[in-house]
Amino acid sequence: MPALPPAPELKPSTVSRRQLFGLAAALALAPSLATAAGKKALFWQLRGPGEANGVLFGYERINANLAPDVVADGNGYVDAAKQILVDVGPKVVLPKSNLDRKAITPILKLLDAQTADRLRAIFSTSPQLASVVDTLSGVEATVLLMGEGQHRPEPTVGGVIMGSAKQKGLAVRQLVSDEEFQELGRNVDLTAINRAIDQPKIAYLLETRHRVGPIGAHLEKLYVQRQSDELQRFNEDVRLHGIPTPGLWVDQPKLTGLLLARLTDQLRTIGPEPFFAMAPISLLTGQQGLLAALAARDIAVSLPS
């Protein structure tokens, strides 16, 4: 069984905002134009009214060594591109969130004996968590269960593809400025979120883990295999059971709107030179996603040939 995430990334006294936000892409998938037909997709071809065209890549914080075929495809599209577009800069910072330990009750005290024993048995396999398992909050337990089995993301798939683009000397343009992104950040009350984590939610995650294995590893595998349709079904089930998602940290509809405006402008006003663009896959799919919004603006969206 894959080990739980190590303590430095998921400290028992804090919840890593980067870890939470990084899970968003895997948790927030919805049906896409391409996957509606049961096709696997992480790359989409965009064509404007004229000759402008580009490829849009839905990235995730996945270790590049796990998905060499995705990296190879990305590098191939980069080779054909004249410009690289990225959603946000690499150094953006989300608002700080704190968990008031004096205001919480450890999650094990809120569970029935059987559920508590199952949760304790899982976390006790990690030397870093065994000594603090009885003090973990509900939100920490949720993050740990959702991330269990994931590999460290560095080097990421997107990072390796970007490195290839920079080596080729391609121009890189940021679609959303750091200042714009900062304005989209939300101050999240982790203590309030923690109050929503209860017996039914933990029991659901444990039953899901029993069915698919460590959840983080399962989500990672689905992305690597480009199974966007299965990721969407998994996410729907997660949402129906009230599991909080890290999209709370940023105004995703507004972020999607900014990306829509910038990509539409690129496809309508820029010349025919092809581009390669990257954005979180969580923002691309679904009826309210970027792909559907682009199609509504007469941008042709399809799978690359």
Image: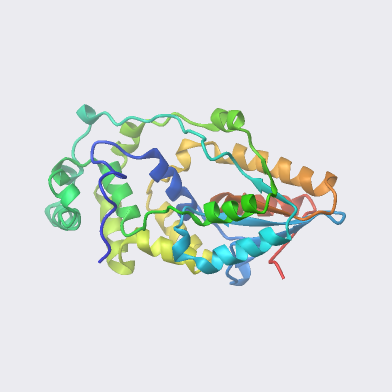
Q: Position of residue 51 (x, y in %)?
A: 86, 56
**41 horizontally vs 296: left or right:** left
Image quadrant occupied by the N terminus: bottom left
Q: Position of residue 160 (x, y in %)?
A: 54, 55
Whether residue 96 appears in this view of the structure is yes
State which quadrant residue 18 falls in: top left
Residue at position x 18%, y 39% in the image: 106
Q: Could you tell me which residue is drawn at 56 percent across and 41 percent down?
A: 252
Residue 212 lies, with reference to residue 47, above or below; the image says: below
Q: Residue at x 49, y 65 (%)?
A: 67
- What is the x, y in percent for residue 171? 70, 45
Question: How many numbered circles are shown?
Answer: 0
Q: How is the image coloured?
A: rainbow
**Towards the viewer: 258 or 293:** 258
Question: Of all residues shown, which one is farthest toward the right?
Answer: 50
- Which sits in the foreground, 232 or 180? 180
Image point (66%, 55%), residue name: 56
Q: Which corner quadrant of the image does residue 303 belong to?
A: bottom right
In the image, taking residue 39 as reference, residue 133 lies left or right, namely left
Query: In what quadrant of the picture does the C terminus appear?
Result: bottom right
**Residue 226 visible in this rendered orientation of the protein:** no
Residue 5's spot in the image, x, y percent? Answer: 29, 52
- Relative to 125, residue 213 above or below: below
